[in-house]
Amino acid sequence: MIDQAPGQPVDDSGAPIQEPRLWQGNGWSARVIKNEDDEGWAVAMIKDGEPEPVLVGPWTMGRDKKNPKPLDTAAFHTLVKSASEVMRRHEQQLHALLHKSTVVSVGGEEIKVTLDIVPDDEHPYALLTAIGQSGDRMAQIRRPCRLSSGSGSRIRPRSCSTVPAAAMVRMPARDSVSRAASRPCTTW
């Protein structure tokens, strides 16, 4: 039997729904749907609480070659594993897109420069930080950003008013960094 997640839809008997075209359990729902693109079938994996499917893929035809093969426990577990992997990869890609770092050498000292973009719905911002070899934070600048959506779910900064990393680490004093931060940069 599949463990039931809190808040998961159940039928009248209190058990998770496990029908030929709808299977629920472990915080996921698998729904077999008619494939709009051709005459076959597809399965949509939806994480509980999410409005859109995480994964939509082709589904096997049944023996009569008209109706879909019914969902079962093994197929559901495989679909949950695949959908979870898709979510994990998406989260990794988003993290890599929003958190960048590089190392620059200034006067024989290596300085790690990080750029962290926080895509808040109302007030997104970028955080540019310089960290010395000893691990001490040398400088940090926070500036608001305007984000735009490109193709699909990619998030790209359109404009941030902050200094480039190379300009920031060349400045010896903190007040110099603050003065330089007022210079706008429109590209990353």
Image (cartoon, grey):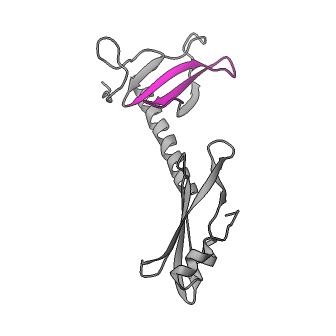
Tell whether position 48 is magenta: yes
> Could you say where residue 181 lies in the image, as x and y percent from the top left?
60, 71
Residue 76 visible at all: yes
Residue 81 image offset from top left, x and y in percent = 44, 37
**Residue shown at 35% from the left, 14% from the top:** 11
Residue found 42% across the figure and 77% down from its top: 135
Q: Is residue 59 or residue 144 the one in the foreground? A: 144
Left or right of residue 55: residue 166: right
Res 18 → quadrant: top left
Residue 104 visible in this rendered orientation of the protein: no
| Quadrant for the N terminus in the image | top left
Residue at (46, 81) in percent of width and height: 133
**In the image shown, does 101 or 139 lie closer to the viewer?**
139
**Is 164 situated above or below 43?**
below
The stretch drawn in magenta includes residue 105: no
Give the extent of the magenta segment.
Answer: 27-52
